[in-house]
Amino acid sequence: MTAKITRLSRLLEAATLIALCLLPLAALWTVASGLADPEAVRTAFPGLDIAGPIPPGKAAATAAMGLLAALPAMAALWYMRGLFALYRRGQILTDAAAERIRRIGAALVVLAVAGTLLHTAQALLLTIDNPAGQRHLVLSLSSDSLGFLLSGGLLVVIGWAMREAARAAAENASFV
Amino acid sequence: MEIVVRLDVMLARRKMRSRELAEIVGITEANLSLLKSGKVKGIRFETLGRICAALECQPGDLLEAIPSAD
């Protein structure tokens, strides 16, 4: 079983490392496309009534706000990479692995909350120049955010449980 | 009370080396050394049984309860 964990972890460590490199590039691409075609932002917020043309600066600022959501995602990927590195080295039931699982969960919870709040802020920024009465304050909980929230919470609890498992494993190791 | 391991005494009586006992019991020499020095939290019944079989003795020959120092 340990050999299987080691093999798959090596693969997933490489995959998370690649994702860590690609995520900032994708985020920068989003900002750049916001600058190149400000009207593309309008399609990203279909339910929003944005009056007049969107200035490139505002489009870029909206895209840049979306970038903030990439930070907890990158943190989650970073801790995942660390967790897979530990598993690759055979350090499975350890405090370090349990702590990384807990941190991945915490990062996903932050991602869910940040995603929701940033969407609200982006909608407000895009409609701030609308005439009075037509500005939008949107507060929505998407299925993605709910998924991240629940899976993040689950991982935090699993992280705590794994800490107990690590303690039990350490005690077991001290028996001959 | 404190439990003291008297494995070294039994090894000497049976004129057996630690390495030999470790091989028979199926544990590492390092673990046997830890057991001899009492630096383990416990011993599994399975290990105790194998040591007793190898040294032809009873658990009471290997473990002794003595009053604690404090």
Image (cartoon, helix red, strand yellow):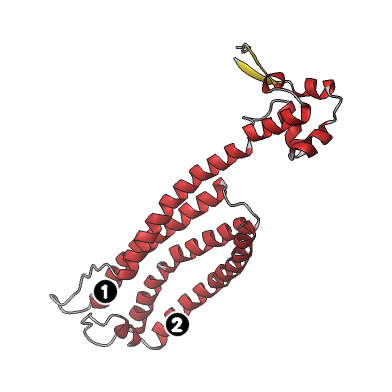
Q: Chain of mark 2?
A: A
Q: Residue at x 25, y 72 (%)?
A: A124
The amino acid beneath tag 2 is Ala
Q: Is residue A46 visible?
A: yes
> Residue drawn 29% across and 70% down?
A142
Say which element carries label 2.
helix
Mark 1 element type = helix
Label 1 marks a residue whose chain is: A
Q: Quadrant of residue A85?
A: bottom right
The circle on residue A123 is 1
Q: Quadrant of residue A136?
A: bottom left
The x, y position of residue B20, in whole percent, is 83, 35
Q: Is residue B17 left or right of residue A119?
A: right
Above/below status of A28 relative to B4: below
Taking depth in this image into account, of A92 and A19 the one nearest to the observer is: A92
Measuring 64% from the left and 31% from the top, which residue is drawn there? B43
Residue indicated by mark 2: A32
Q: CA distance from mark 1 to mark 2?
A: 19 Å
**Residue A104: x percent and y percent?**
47, 58
Q: Is residue B57 left or right of residue A115?
A: right
Q: Give the quarter of the image for residue A62.
A: bottom left
